[in-house]
Amino acid sequence: MSKLTKDPNELMRRWMVVYMNLNMMLSTDPAVTEVLDDMKDKLAETNEKVMAFFDLVGAHLEEEA
């Protein structure tokens, strides 16, 4: 079992591996492909929001230091 990580880039990489594997196995069904594409887009959006949040927290901590 892999270790948990808090690195957003590593999380995104792992999700992309899952996405690509599922897409290869199930790409014959257009409905599944559509759901997987939607999942990929939502994960990318979430990753951007997480990175923006960490930037805001970092900026706030720097102001207080």
Image (tube, rainbow, N blue to C red):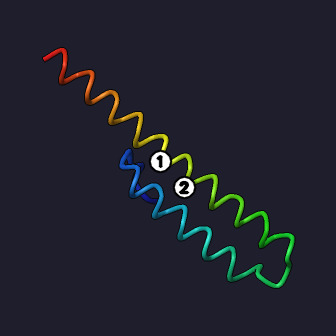
- The reply, left or right, for residue 52 in relation to residue 24 is left
Residue corresponding to mark 1? 48
**What x and y, as percent, mark residue 52?**
41, 39
The quadrant the C terminus occupies is top left
- In this rendering, is residue 44 above or below 24? above
Residue type (three-letter) at the residue carrying disc 1: Glu
Q: In which image quadrant can residue 16 be found?
A: bottom right
Image point (49%, 49%), residue name: 47
Question: Residue pushed farthest top?
Answer: 64
38 relative to 63, above or below? below
In the rendering, at what x and y percent does residue 26 appear?
A: 77, 79
User: Distance between the Cα atoms at labels 1 and 2?
Assistant: 6 Å
Residue linked to disc 2: 44
Label 2 residue SS: helix
Q: At x 18% / y 24%, what residue is drawn?
A: 62
Q: Amino acid at mark 2?
A: Ala
**Measured from the top left, where is residue 20 in percent x and y?**
60, 75
